[in-house]
Amino acid sequence: MLRAVHVVIVGCGRVGSTLALELIASGHTVAVIDRKSDAFKRLGENFSGLTIAGIGFDRDVLLEAGIDRAQAVAAVTNGDNSNILIARVAREKFGIEKVVARIYDPKRAEIYERLGVATVATVKWTSERILRRILPDISSVEWTDPSSNVVLIEREFPNSLVGKKATEILLASACISAIRRLGTAVIPDEKTIVQQGDVGYFMVEINSLNQLDDLLKQGAS
């Protein structure tokens, strides 16, 4: 069972509302910030989280949302500049490690990825990707083959694997296909060393999915 976390979401559009409802349904606590109070109608009458009308990068508004006890922040307004400013305030002023910003301009997204700010885009894909970064233990599958036997999954490398060769992370029924580092994906070879913040893409037989996750959590032997 996943440990409950508190998440601050700035922006209550389609992505923000979808993300908030999924987090609440999973047993987490959520505070949603939006400039317009009408936006909270997307959450429905039974929404149990906190809603705050205000500017998402305002310190007092963020404190009202409980950012001082939050484990993650998602900036998903409709403006790139606002989202990056929110992300920077969350990381630099409040020390939040898990921060994700929605960026519409792919060129700018690459720049911010290199600065260590995770960026994503599009509604359904965005909410799923944010959930994976906020809750790294959540089960996620990128692709499934027609026979439903092999899947492609995305997993963050734990700190215990930093400094080790990517090719040493072996499992009989799994292999690493690519590594995303600083916004760029590469095919690993014998010389590729895992660095902090790396994200791996693994091809694995469906029956060995839990085994691979256990291997990554424990660190390669």
Image: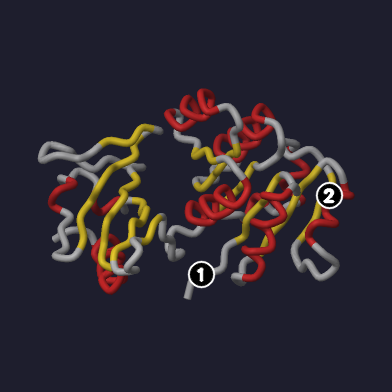
Sequence-first disc among 2 and 1: 1
Quarter the C terminus occupies: bottom left
User: Compared with residue 105, is residue 217 higher up or lower down, i.e. above or below?
Assistant: below
User: Compared with residue 159, is residue 82 higher up or lower down, i.e. above or below?
Assistant: above
Residue 87 horizontal/vertical position (percent):
60, 37
Residue 186 horizontal/vertical position (percent):
27, 35
Residue at numbered disc 2: 39
Q: Residue at x 15, y 45 (%)?
A: 165
Residue 146 horizontal/vertical position (percent):
35, 63
Q: CA distance from mark 2 to mark 1?
A: 29 Å
Question: Label 2 amino acid?
Answer: Ala
Residue 43 horizontal/vertical position (percent):
78, 60
User: Compared with residue 96, is residue 3 higher up or lower down, i.e. above or below?
Assistant: below
Residue at numbered disc 1: 3
Label 1 element class: loop
Please state if 47 lies on the left or on the right of 99 as rendered.
right
